[in-house]
Amino acid sequence: MREVFGALGASLMAACAGEAPEMATAPALSLGSVALERPPAYFDGVADDLLTGGLGLEGLNAAAPPADASLRSKAIHYNFRAIIDVTEAGGFTRLYGPAKDRLKVAGTEYRALLRVDGMKTSFAVAVLIPDDFDADDPCLIVAPSSGSRGLYGAIGTGGAIGLARGCAVALTDKTTGTGYVHLETGEGYDVDLALTDDPAEMLYALDESERREAAAALGSGAIAVKHAHSGENVERFWGRATLAAAEYGLAVLDRHFADRKMTRENTRVLAVSISNGGRAALMAAEADETGLLDGVVVSEPSVAPASPGRVVVDGAEIEGAGRPLYDYASFANLLAPCAALAPSLADEPGATFSASAAPAFAGWCAKLAEAGLVEGATVERQAERALAALRAYGFAPDTDPLFHYSVAVRIWPAVTVAYANAYGRYGAGDALCGAYYAFADADGTQRAPTQEEKQALAARSGGVPPGAGVEILYRDGPAAAFDAAMCFRRLWTESESRVREGVNEVLNTADLRAVPTIILHGRADALIPVDHASRAYVAAARSNAALRYYEIERGQHFDAFLTAPEMAARFAPMQYYLEKSVDLMLDHLRAGAKLPPSQVVRQTSRGPGPLGAEHLGAIRAEPDGDAIEKEEGAIAVPR
């Protein structure tokens, strides 16, 4: 083994099942630098593998990974199941994803921490090179994680797509990731997801005085989170981090195949991901001054154009389209608990949860009424008014079946607390609006984590709480949640707020530099409303003949929800269309095939049985009445 840049120790190297190529010194990057590299790990595709961590289909469908599984395998299990429907009935291995006998992918993984210019903290990258990589027609898929997820956040989306097509894959946490810090001890997590007290290894480390002060203020079990508390507004770097991951991936390929030259000139590079990962991919295209990317394919991206275009649906213009995430998330965080009691939502999936929380939600409605935010003499009337306000703010009736689920999994507090801190560049010790993160029991009692919880946290976390034992707590107790929601909303409505300034730093230019791009979005997306995101972005996009927008009629944000029968009966998997779109893009780049025009893609309800190809409408070369028309500064979508 020749010299390796940075630390060599890595707990996950025990997962190696064979010899991997030797490493030279770290490559030089034009977009940043390599802070640390691990030795390459080879996985034989039997005991362990690149895609499923050795779990295969049966293991991915198990409720939990084996207790003795590696941190890597646990993270893969968690991230696969959190993002896509991995059941055969739902189409996995039949209609999308690798075939069942090709799920375990043999190959080599290179892991590293990178930095981009201007950023103080590092971010994680893993380059996966399958044994069946086609060196005669090389391709690289760069897959930034969705949400705030860590290194393996896109393993089931862009990762699975790339490996199934013989491409190398560069996974990256895009500067968010599972950068947790335990305030009492200063311990954090490294690129291997392992607990460490070495700041040089950590994804995120606090200044010692800041850590001690925050620990004293917040108590036992409190944590800081990189995405929320780094003080860098890391979202600014998502595009450049994605490009740096692609550049590193090319360098690793060139090093891996010592007898063949792998360069930008002979290797196709695609950015593929969903949600925040999709936003990162589009930001990469916007920032791609050197022509590194050949194409972009994204689904439900959380984009926010600086100058939103006009959105017209069935001839009627949508007012207020193009609001940024923090605006509509903080609004939903304030109104959704009350709206969940609206009689018009009583028959939607998950209504039993809202009914069980009715006393607390009724109290929330009363506080909204007292604040003059809703009207009505009864809880039912107040709830309907709250729902009407959400409708007017971009949450269309198509999203109703997801409403109770979104409230139950606490989507809106998770987004609002994390992004308010991130955009405003607040620290953990600030406990912004009285909210902070700490381990807690089910009843909300703050506590210290067990050693097992600490060791597994990075592998079991989505990057921001709540989850994996970490909760959103309030200095004045659970009853302060409403006051906190009001406070978080004011951080947007105050014109001079630090949060608003931070949001303005990350608005999209919508200039894709003529990079061929496919954007997908589900019409029923209840997290990233389509009017505010993809419709407004495509409308605003500068002239680009190779931009296509496919709106999926029965698509929504969380394919993992489709494991619930009541959701499976209503919705189509977005992953299916992401894969189809990548194939369309590869055909376009390889053979010059024409990309189908922008369109609404229709589906047939699956009902209670397994998903079949007959339920999934095609992206058509001639969409006829389903065509979406784009002109300068506007988009027209058929209902």
Image (cartoon, rainbow, N blue to C red):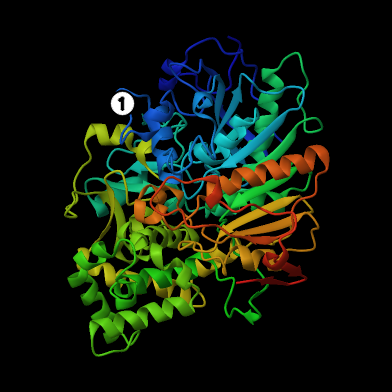
Q: On the image, numbered disc 1 is attached to which residue?
A: 66
Q: Assess disc 1: are there few (<14), some (14-19) or many (≥20) residues with their C-alpha within 10 Å of its C-alpha.
A: few
**Who's the residue at 29% across and 71% down the image?**
346
Q: Is residue 214 visible?
A: yes
Which of the 4 quarters of the picture holds residue 208?
Answer: top left
Please indicate whether residue 515 sits to the left or right of residue 21 in the image: right
Closest to the observer, 269 or 449: 269
Query: What is the quadrant of the N terminus in the image?
Result: top right
Closest to the observer, 220 or 111: 111
Q: Which amino acid does label 1 sit on?
A: Pro
Question: How many numbered circles does the render carry?
Answer: 1
Residue 352, above or below 31: below
Could you say where residue 470 lies in the image, as x and y percent from the top left? 29, 48
Could you say where residue 446 lies in the image, as x and y percent from the top left? 19, 51
Residue 217, above or below 523: above
Could you say where residue 385 lies in the image, as x and y percent from the top left? 36, 83
Q: Is residue 305 visible?
A: no
Residue 72, above or below 348: above
Query: What is the quadrant of the C terminus in the image?
Result: bottom right
Circle 1: element type: loop
